[in-house]
């Protein structure tokens, strides 16, 4: 098995947002015990990981967050990323504690270019204002900032505006994720799941703004190469390239690229595609909702 680079830790699924389509819960979330957390950290280091990704749920709800970050740095993790809805990071004192504990970077969940869109999709009035404060506080204290943008039908057209608005505020990279659905998803969630063909023009427009020289300024997950113009395939993201092991409460561990939420389905024509070996495939939930006619061999 390939060595790990990243260990992803999910301390719990609890969250203080109520985002449309999210699986996180309010109460009775399974929670990783301190012993399990330490065992996962040690396992990651033993497998070669030196980057830690703390996600959830919302990890800032966990009292042990700083202790975990401190322990991770003591064990030899050189990067500790916090993936968060950003609301707690609106408070500079909290950000100071993050930095002191050894957190090196922050991924903020952003769902719109405006408060109207962001707060509607997070179902949390005032969330957008807090995220803007978080950007300022993190930037002032030297934390690297990225945006995780979950793409819905409702916010897809705002992707270029998000990049224009947040890059000057310190966001260095944008990771675009397509909303996924499940069999028991509500009609509202199913209605919000966009087609790649409808989103791609906005990704292209955002890349063409030319606001950063970074090759990985905008990465797009869940959009196989055949859905991206050849001129813009710099945005393609390969889950396997992260060498990331996900660890969830209850002893559940899996490599990111084996998750059905990352792809794995290859429609019939894929066998003759020149990019087949480098393609993670199509998500099954996407194919079920939108079919596979968009995917044509390159
Ligand atoms: S392997 Fe299939 S899904 Fe992947 S790029 Fe080729 S045609 Fe598209």
Image (spheres, rainbow, N blue to C red):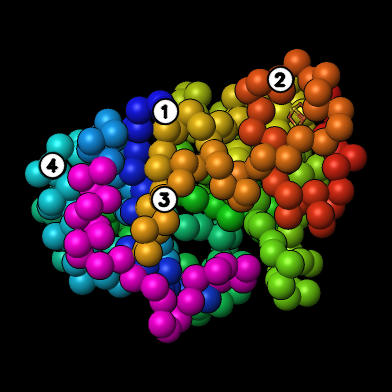
Residue most toward the top?
274
**Above/below status of 167 relative to 58:** above
Mark 3 or mark 4: name the one nearer the start of the chain: 4
Choose the circle earlier in sequence order: 3 or 1. Answer: 1
- Judged by depth in the image, the label closer to the viewer, 3 or 2, is 3
Residue 79, horizontal then vertical, whole percent: 25, 39
Q: In the visual, does 99 lie left or right of 283?
A: left
Magenta region, main secondary structure = loop
Q: Residues within 10 Å of mark 3 (few under 14, many from 20)?
A: some
Which residue does the numbered mark 2 point to in the structure image? Answer: 275
| Residue drawn at point x = 76 percent, y = 35 percent | 266
Picture residue at 49% right of the left edge, 42% below the top = 256
Q: Is residue 183 left or right of residue 87?
A: right
Residue range in magenta is: 19-43
Residue ID at (44%, 33%):
242
Disc number at residue 75? Answer: 4
Nearest-to-viewer mark from 3 and 4: 3
First along the sequence among labels 4 and 2: 4
Nearer to us of marks 1 and 4 is: 1
- Image side of residue 127 versus residue 199, left or right: left
Locate residue 197: give its quadrant: top right
């Amino acid at each position: 098995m390939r060595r790990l680079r990243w260990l992803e830790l999910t301390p719990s699924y609890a969250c203080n947002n109520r985002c449309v389509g999210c699986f996180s819960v309010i109460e009775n979330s399974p929670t990783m015990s301190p012993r399990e957390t330490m065992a996962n950290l040690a396992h990651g280091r033993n497998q070669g990981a030196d980057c830690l990704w703390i996600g959830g749920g919302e990890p800032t709800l966990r009292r042990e967050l700083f202790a975990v970050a401190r322990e991770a740095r003591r064990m030899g993790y050189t990067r500790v990323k916090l993936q968060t809805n950003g609301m707690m990071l609106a408070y500079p004192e909290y950000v100071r504690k993050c930095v002191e504990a050894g957190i090196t970077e922050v991924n903020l969940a952003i769902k719109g270019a405006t408060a109207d869109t962001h707060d509607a999709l997070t179902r949390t009035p005032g969330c957008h204002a807090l995220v803007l404060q978080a950007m300022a506080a993190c930037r002032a204290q030297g934390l690297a900032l990225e945006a995780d943008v979950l793409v819905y039908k409702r916010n897809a057209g705002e992707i270029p505006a998000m990049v224009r608005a947040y890059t000057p505020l310190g966001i260095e990279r944008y990771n675009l994720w397509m909303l996924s659905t499940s069999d028991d998803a509500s009609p509202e969630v199913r209605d919000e799941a966009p087609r790649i063909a409808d989103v791609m023009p906005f990704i292209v427009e955002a890349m063409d703004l030319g606001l950063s020289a970074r090759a990985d300024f905008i990465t797009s997950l869940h959009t196989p190469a055949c859905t991206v113009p050849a001129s813009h395939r710099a945005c393609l993201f390969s889950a396997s390239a992260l060498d990331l092991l996900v660890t969830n409460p209850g002893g559940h561990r899996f490599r990111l690229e084996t998750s059905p939420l990352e792809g794995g389905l290859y429609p019939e024509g894929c066998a003759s595609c020149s990019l087949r070996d480098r393609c993670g495939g199509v998500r099954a939930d996407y194919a079920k909702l939108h079919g596979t006619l968009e995917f044509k061999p390159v």
